[in-house]
Image (spheres, rainbow, N blue to C red):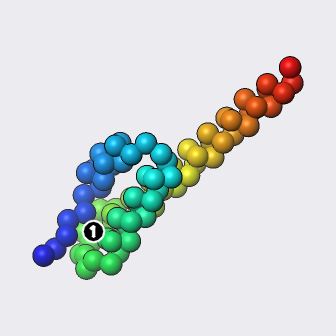
Amino acid sequence: MKKEFDFSKTKEHLKTIDKLEDKIEHLLEVKTDYLQTENYWELGVVPFDKKCELEIKKLYELIELRNMNRTNRTSKKQKF
């Protein structure tokens, strides 16, 4: 039985996960599953694993942005 990988369904599922780290973990799991499954890529279509990589990159950037915001808020509080 061929397993179906639908990135739009994956994105919908990510909305149900609160923590960014848990979202990354889920994406790494499904990406690994995808890469371990025999798949035939369509020309002109971004493969599922590449979409996962892009989403993971975005989430890491969001984590970095949140950390920067926390640092900025903390440094502003310390000035007063």
Q: Is residue 38 above or below residue 80?
A: below
Left/right placement of residue 68 relative to residue 42 reads right
Residue for point 43% across, 52% down: 23
Q: Is residue 53 above or below residue 17?
A: below
Q: In the image shown, does 17 or 2 lie closer to the viewer?
A: 17
Tell which residue pokes out farthest to the right in this image.
79
How packed mark 1 is, by other alpha carbons closer than 10 Å (few <14, some 14-19, many 20 or more), is: few
**Quadrant for the N terminus in the image:** bottom left
- The residue type indicated by label 1 comes to Leu
- The location of residue 47, given as percent across then percent down, is 33, 65
Task: Please state the total of marks drawn on the protein image.
Answer: 1
Left/right placement of residue 51 relative to residue 74 reads left
Q: Is residue 52 above or below residue 14?
A: below
Q: In the image shown, does 60 or 46 lie closer to the viewer?
A: 60
- The location of residue 20, given as percent across then percent down, is 49, 48
**Quadrant for the C terminus in the image:** top right
Residue for point 56% across, 52% down: 60
- Can the viewer see residue 57 in this picture? yes
Location of residue 51 by image quarter: bottom left
Residue for point 34% across, 43% down: 16
- The location of residue 66, given as percent across then percent down, is 61, 39
Tell which residue pokes out farthest to the left in this image.
1
| Secondary structure at numbered mark 1 | loop
Residue denoted by label 1: 43
- Can the viewer see residue 58 in this picture? no
- The location of residue 10, given as percent across then percent down, is 30, 53
Residue for point 72% across, 29% down: 73
